[in-house]
Image (tube, grey):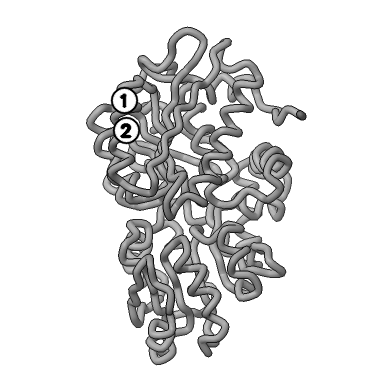
Amino acid sequence: MRKLVPIISASMLVAAACGGAGGSGGSTVKVGFIESLTGNYAPLGGDAKKTVELAVDQINNAGGIKGKKIKLITLDDKTAPDQGVLHFNKLKSEKVTAILGSTFSNTALAVEPLAERERIPYVSLASTDAQVDPIKSYTFVVPAIASTYAQQMLAYFKAHGITKVVVAHDTQSAYAKAGLGGTRKYAAQYGVQILKEETYETAASDFSPLFAHVRASGAQALVVWGSGAPVVTMAKQYPSSGLKLPLFLTGAQASKLWLDPVGKAAEGVYVQSAIGVVGEHLPDGRLKQAVREMSGPFKQKYGYEPPQFAMDGYAGVKLLAAAIEKAGTDRKKIRDELERLTLVTPTGKYTYSKTDHSGLKPTDVSMNQVEDGRFVPTRWSLKQLAETARAAG
């Protein structure tokens, strides 16, 4: 079997495999990973698991850190916050140096206060704002947070004369609630009026009442904050709704897990994503190279392009690795290094600081439209992506 080892600097190899205080012993280094591998978020968590393991394998196949291999301890939160809490306590007893957190925002919010209390660096793969607003000492987020996605969507609306929208959101999703909150917070700044706020539940299967409300609103666009099956169902029903206004979705749909089941109904829908999802459209440079180092081995092994959640898992390992490279295995020093870290990854160039534990900007988010079953950046985003790539070097 061909080894999936891209060309990586020696410093990055050292970084990605290091463990924390009490987390290294003998020939291994322990890193904890809590993820949704069963339950509603299993498809999302499964993609993140693939790239977390890919990053770890790349490091270990290249010799590990000073001869020590990463021992990744992966635990399934079953898309249930209480399971995340149980697993945190197990990882604490294992004396891991740091923890990569769940894609499921509700689990992330349950685990975060425990990581803060125990002073264990927690690198989250969930995008809910509350994890980092206000700042928490030991918590850092990998995906662009929901309000960052909201700002980029509103900037697109401003640039294209969209001033009146309806926003629908899942009442049971912390991510969806954060997205609604970010849209509310920044709408006026971009000259956008939210005419109506429509709600639906995770188990929803008929969106005709919601569509009827949108039809009567006079809106120019429908924005949906949510994830999983409901947004698949909504998109499939949208062409027959009679609505002529464009449908805008967020990074939670930037995956074949949404594209494939929606099929032809996805054509023309606007879907935001991390830069790496549309990395083939980037100009050559550090950013595109970072995407290739992950996407090439991923596609070779799994047969499809890495989606949003895969990008986040890989970037999470890289960010944690870069901090450990400088800090060693001391948890507080790792935290300190994360807080002053700048790093180019497949999801963009991160710049963490004492006042920013999310690290990404609105311009690290691409506004795409589905064309022939693929996410294609809009002309507006192509220009921004080129500028972002040049800034990354």
- Describe the element under mark 2 as helix, strand or loop: helix
Q: Residue lying farthest left?
A: 117
Tell me which amino acid carries mark 2: Phe
Q: Residue at x 32, y 33 (%)?
A: 88
Q: Is residue 277 above or below residue 110?
A: below
Which quadrant holds residue 197? bottom left
Q: Nearer the viewer, residue 258 or 352?
A: 258
Q: Is residue 109 visible?
A: yes
Q: Is residue 307 left or right of residue 78?
A: right
Q: Is residue 44 above or below residue 13?
A: below
The alpha-carbon separation of the residues under discs 2 and 1 comes to: 6 Å
Which quadrant holds residue 196? bottom left
Q: Nearer the viewer, residue 164 or 40?
A: 40
Where does the C terminus fall, quadrant-wise?
A: top right
Q: Is residue 53 left or right of residue 77?
A: right
Q: Is residue 184 above or below residue 293?
A: below
Q: Residue at x 38, y 49 (%)?
A: 79
Tell me residue 58's x, y (percent).
Answer: 63, 27
Q: Residue at x 49, y 20 (%)?
A: 18
User: Within 10 Å of the Cα at label 2, are there few (<14), some (14-19), or many (20+) other Cα atoms?
Assistant: many
Q: Residue lying farthest bottom?
A: 216
Q: Nearer the viewer, residue 375 or 133?
A: 375
Count how many numbered circles sit on residues in the image. Answer: 2
Q: Is residue 349 left or right of residue 99?
A: right
Q: Are marks 2 and 1 in contact (CB under 8 Å)?
A: yes
Tell me residue 179's x, y (percent).
Answer: 38, 62
Tell me residue 209's x, y (percent).
Answer: 39, 85
Question: What residue sits right under mark 2 in the picture?
Answer: 88
Question: What residue sits right under mark 1 in the picture?
Answer: 92
Tell me residue 159's x, y (percent).
Answer: 53, 73
Q: Nearer the viewer, residue 20 or 257?
A: 257
Q: Residue lying farthest top?
A: 26
